[in-house]
Image: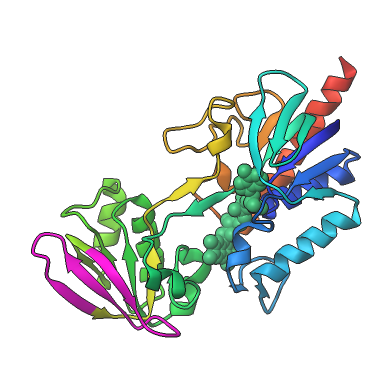
Amino acid sequence: MDKLIIIGSGPAGLTAAIYAVRGGINTLVIAGREAGGQLMLTTDVDDFPGFETGIQGPELMAKMRKQAERFNVRFIGEDVVSVDFSKEPFTIKTETKSLSARSVILATGASAMWLNLESEQRLRGRGVSACAVCDGFFFKDKVVAVVGGGDTAMREANYLSKLATKAIVIHRRDALRAQAALQSLVKSKSNVEFVFNSTVEEVLGQDKVTGIKLKNTQTGEISQIELDGLFIAIGHKPNTGFLKGQIELDERGYAVVKDEIQTSVEGIFVAGDVSDHRYRQAVTAAGAGCKAAFDAEEYLENLVSV
Ligand SMILES: Cc1cc2nc3c(=O)[nH]c(=O)nc-3n(C[C@H](O)[C@H](O)[C@H](O)COP(=O)(O)OP(=O)(O)OC[C@H]3O[C@@H](n4cnc5c(N)ncnc54)[C@H](O)[C@@H]3O)c2cc1C
């Protein structure tokens, strides 16, 4: 039996592993089929401290993994399919193995929701993004659009309005559903425009985004807008499907937490985007991983002393 199992090998899981193993805890990481997490899908990461000229996402994750391996963290490259957290030791089933642990850190991240257009997927990282804080800087003094009408879309539009010459919010309904304060903030920006009742039918461009094709949901009319960047802000889905009924999840599927890290089950901790729908950054996920490792260490110490 492992003392601690960490599920997920993005910045949160790998940081938790480095801290846990250096704290003397025998640690296994179930890395998942998409080992390395979301940063494996991106190119330039310019905001992770310590890399003065930036670093490529996959290179950053390879460095984190090597650092964990230096301290003899063990890895399994499979997905977890089910867990039983009703009794301790906890049981974790992967695609081929049944494992048990005295404590678990869940660091399974979240996935951005996409429009699922062929052109959108082809141009991801070439003008199509789901993270303004991560990629907005590449669109300084350019024209961008944000797809969505909720809080996330307003935050993205607000952020981009400070960099781009123009940010166009495209929403499929006739009114936004973001909270009023966020709506007012974005509407007060002179360089933000709104296009309502419209869906993106196609992202235009071969090697990089040059524009979008829109369809008016009421008239069916097709139009085009020239722009340089397209930010999809229609929500994120936390990777918690296998946790249903095991820990408390909110209506969107995010882990419900106490003190940021503790789930509804004692001994089960969370870190990173799996519970954080607000900040969603590599550095905040890594910070949460560190906190989760400390809390797991304290929990395990108390188990031993009773
Ligand atoms: C295109 C893109 C660009 C970005 N650019 C930046 C940037 O420049 N700067 C920045 O700070 N942030 C950036 N982000 C955000 C950043 O990547 C995330 O905030 C960060 O990766 C979250 O880390 P995490 O460890 O919580 O989750 P993730 O990185 O999502 O990792 C989750 C891990 O859990 C695993 N997993 C999921 N389900 C299971 C399962 N059932 N069993 C086992 N394992 C599982 C996955 O395989 C993965 O290893 C970007 C995100 C994207 C999508």
Residue farthest toward the top in the current orientation of the protein: 306
Residue 245 % position (x, y): 54, 25
Q: Is residue 130 above or below residue 277?
A: below
Residue farthest toward the front in the current orientation of the protein: 96
Residue 117 % position (x, y): 36, 66
Q: Is residue 140 above or below residue 87?
A: below
**Left or right: where does residue 193 sit relative to residue 254?**
left
Ligand 1 visible in quadrant? bottom right
Asked if the magenta segment contains residue 29, the reply would be no
Residue at left 25%, top 71%? 190
Residue at left 34%, top 65%? 146
Q: Is residue 4 above or below residue 147?
A: above
Region of the chain picked out in magenta, as a range: 199-224
Asked if the magenta segment contains residue 200, the reply would be yes
For the N terminus, give its image quadrant.
top right
Q: Is residue 15 above or below residue 161?
A: above
For the C terminus, give its image quadrant.
top right
Residue 184 % position (x, y): 25, 55
Residue 26 % position (x, y): 88, 39
* Residue 108 shows up from this direction: no
* Residue 184 shows up from this direction: yes
Please tell me which residue lies in front, 125 or 188. Answer: 125
Q: How many marks?
A: 0
Residue at left 19%, top 68%? 215
